[in-house]
Amino acid sequence: MENRDLQRYRVKQEVKLKEIDTYEDFNSSDKALKKELENIREDLGKFQDKLYAHGKYAVLVCLQGMDTAGKDSLIREVFKDFNVRGVEVHSFKVPTELERKHDYLWRHYLALPARGKFSVFNRTHYENVLVTKVHPEYILGEDIPGVDTVSDIDSTFWENRYRQINDFEKHIAENGTLIFKFFLHLSKEEQRQRLLRRIRLKEKNWKFSPGDLKERKLWEQYQECYEEAINKTSKTNAPWHIIPADNKKAARVIVASILLEALKKYKDIEEPELDDEIKANLETFKHELEKETE
């Protein structure tokens, strides 16, 4: 892993998204970035094995970003060397009828990682202060007492949601879940180019939806909502990282590097020692197995 200042991506004070770059390449070729990622994810895979054996911590990785920001391909490439038993990916779509009968965090609680495992949220509980803030009429489908019209959804409502999300993350962090939140920061022009590729390339057509263009017209509103959500909820136990996403290969390297650097600091995460009695008899067990071939 290259010696880079990864802390510069972490949100430690109020940010303005318009002032933050959306492109990075580290003056490296695509081939070099691909090789760097391969090395990092191999180390991440080894760490995941230790985390699984240790069984006391869980890791939650939250990915947010505008349409075409590269969340799916990042998940595929960064977690490629993980044992499938140790990582689960959850893509949160429009809530189901059952999910709407519960509070908005319920389905996210159900998807939290067990101790020893990683969970990746592809879109997250933050949709509830992003897409619902751009489209507040969606809130009415939640049947919340006292919220009967859009006019009932005021600034106090959103402040309460930020507080609830912070409390949710504080609770799981205090109980052993390590939280990483990544905003894939895409430029509007790069999104335009990626949407055009989905239309021009036949094999990418299935990814295109006219709804993407409808939401693109609300770009500025979404940016404002992301900015506010990030500023309200980047905490020591659940920090946001703003990742320049116009270059997918560099974005993957940055996310993987941040994960590895932070996780390596947990020196107590090691494979458990064998029971003394078992350890004392390892030679006997080995001899027993070796005899089977004689």
Image: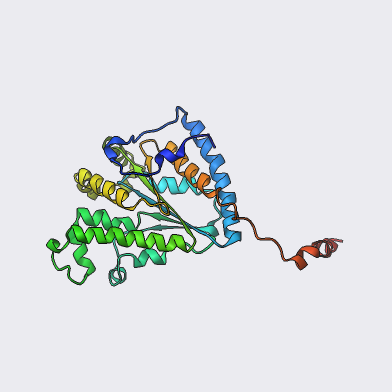
- Can you say which quadrant of the picture contains the N terminus? top right
* Above/below status of 43 relative to 283: above
Residue shown at 25%/49% (left/top)? 225
Number of disc labels: 0
Q: Residue furthest right?
A: 294
- 65 displayed left or right of 115: left
* Above/below status of 279 relative to 7: below
- 269 displayed left or right of 33: right
Residue shown at 57%/59% (left/top)? 52
Residue shown at 21%/63% (left/top)? 139
Q: Nearer the viewer, residue 190 or 257?
A: 257
- Can you say which quadrant of the picture contains the C terminus? bottom right
Residue 48 position within the rendered picture, expressed as x and y whole percent measured from the top left:
56, 53
- 34 displayed left or right of 195: right
- 185 displayed left or right of 213: right
Residue 277 position within the rendered picture, expressed as x and y whole percent measured from the top left:
77, 68
Residue 74 position within the rendered picture, expressed as x and y whole percent measured from the top left:
43, 45
Q: Which image quadrant for residue 246?
A: top left
* Above/below status of 69 relative to 120: above
Q: Nearer the viewer, residue 177 or 122?
A: 177
Residue 85 position within the rendered picture, expressed as x and y whole percent measured from the top left:
54, 60
